[in-house]
Image (cartoon, rainbow, N blue to C red):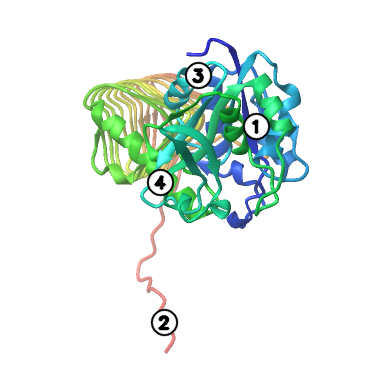
Amino acid sequence: MSTSAMSVVILAAGKGTRMYSDLPKVLHTLAGKPMVQHVIDAATGLGAQQIHLVYGHGGDQLKALLSGNTLNWVLQAQQLGTGHAMQQAAPYFADDEDIVMLYGDVPLISLETLQRLRAAKPAGGIGLLTVVLDNPTGYGRIVRENDTITGIVEQKDATPEQLKIQEINTGILIANGGDLKRWLSQLNNNNAQGEFYITDIIAMAHQEGRLVQAVHPARISETDGVNNRLQLAALERAYQAEQAEKLLLAGVMLRDPARFDLRGTLKHGRDVEIDTNVIIEGNVTLGDRVKIAAGCIIKNSVIADDCEISAYSVIEDASLAAACTVGPFARLRPGSELGEKAHVGNFVEMKKATLGKGSKAGHLSYLGDAEIGDDVNIGAGTITCNYDGANKSKTIIGDNVFVGSDTQLVAPVTVASGATIAAGTTVMKDVPAAVLVYNRKEQNQKAGWLRPEKKK
């Protein structure tokens, strides 16, 4: 394995015409993340000292959406081929470092494959990632003599005999920086496309007596590129199938692996069950024996042991202690925290609110900017009125409070422990401990009243 310093070049200058989009191709997402970000993450994991990103179309959008990365931005004003793209980055190469060449629209390249490629690079030679395909149409063919790689010929330049070759070039390679600069300076565009091909350096290396060592990826999908939305959708399903397989083998029960999406990272305990059409986004942690029913979306949340999330609930930036129950059709917005054995039922929405140990909000309620203690009952239709049109205010409810149905709590307001609030009450002032609060209402009735009838 090479012990040289190493940098990475990512080619991302293409417009992506076949995507029919105003967004640069490499910014289209796979598993909730721009394709090129997957590649940047792989390069970072490989230990790249520098990541040179060659860009052309949509530079402002690229720089805005990738601002969280440390990148050397290299402009390719005209797209004249892969060799031309590498020529733009070449001035930044150190002679004594290795350079890995990757592509922003080949998002599933794995760290493991790149590590094997780097380990296989011969001294003074090139490590080349190749794949054997049943149908190699459209790809550059690997030309060998006595099993030694001597060059790569593109589809449009290949002879009938060369077109029969099934081993193809993926475009991913590693070579010494000084060698690359020398070879890149010798490229020409005397070919059917009139472009500067990076593949021509393979023949140059062979002519110098340098060895070219081929490596195959663990999965074909690692080298699949994206030129249109159909290909992107196919790669999405390939990626999701891989994630589902890993989770199943790690003990997570996915009721239908084909109907599960992981768009981030999932840490999990034992005996976790996930039903169909569940989407996991960002960083999610599920404890032991957690059950997620169909259609749920969970994002950047921690769900402790023995929690059950019923169907079609949405949980985002929330924290649930052990043995909570949520849903169906509940929404926990950012800042929601549930204590042990708390319950949030159907059509209840929480935002920046805590619900204490053993407390329950069973039906049709909004709890925003609220701090609710232990063993509290929130009746159906309860609303914390937290917004006055200009500012948000907080509602504080102590322990063992009973809030009747259709209550409005006009913040800022505090309800002390042990208080009871009658159904239909509008609470506008602080409530002391252990009292009954109600709004006086008069019930009237009219005898002999007739309902209106439809006009004929």
What residue type is disc 1 on?
Leu
Residue 428: tell me if it is visible.
no
Tell me the CA gap for discs 4 and 1.
37 Å
Q: Kindly state the secondary structure of the residue where label 2 is placed.
A: loop
Closer to the N terminus: mark 2 or mark 4?
A: 4
Left or right: 185, with 433 as reference point: right
* Residue for badge 4: 166
Between 176 and 13, the residue placed more toward the observer is 176
Q: Amino acid at mark 3?
A: Pro
Q: Residue 75: give x, y in percent of width and height.
A: 76, 36
Residue visible at 52% across and 47% down? 226
Amino acid under disc 4: Gln
Q: Nearer the viewer, residue 38 or 106?
A: 106
Q: Residue furthest right?
A: 77
Pair 3/2: label in front? 3
Q: Amino acid at mark 2?
A: Lys
Q: Can residue 202 be seen here?
A: yes
For the residues labelled 3 and 2, the Cα–Cα distance comes to 90 Å
Where residue 330 sits: x, y (%)?
Answer: 38, 41
Camera-side mark, 2 or 1 = 1
- Label 3 close to label 2 by CB (< 8 Å): no
Question: For mark 1, what is the residue?
Answer: 66
Residue underneath mark 3: 122
Which numbered tag is attached to residue 454? 2
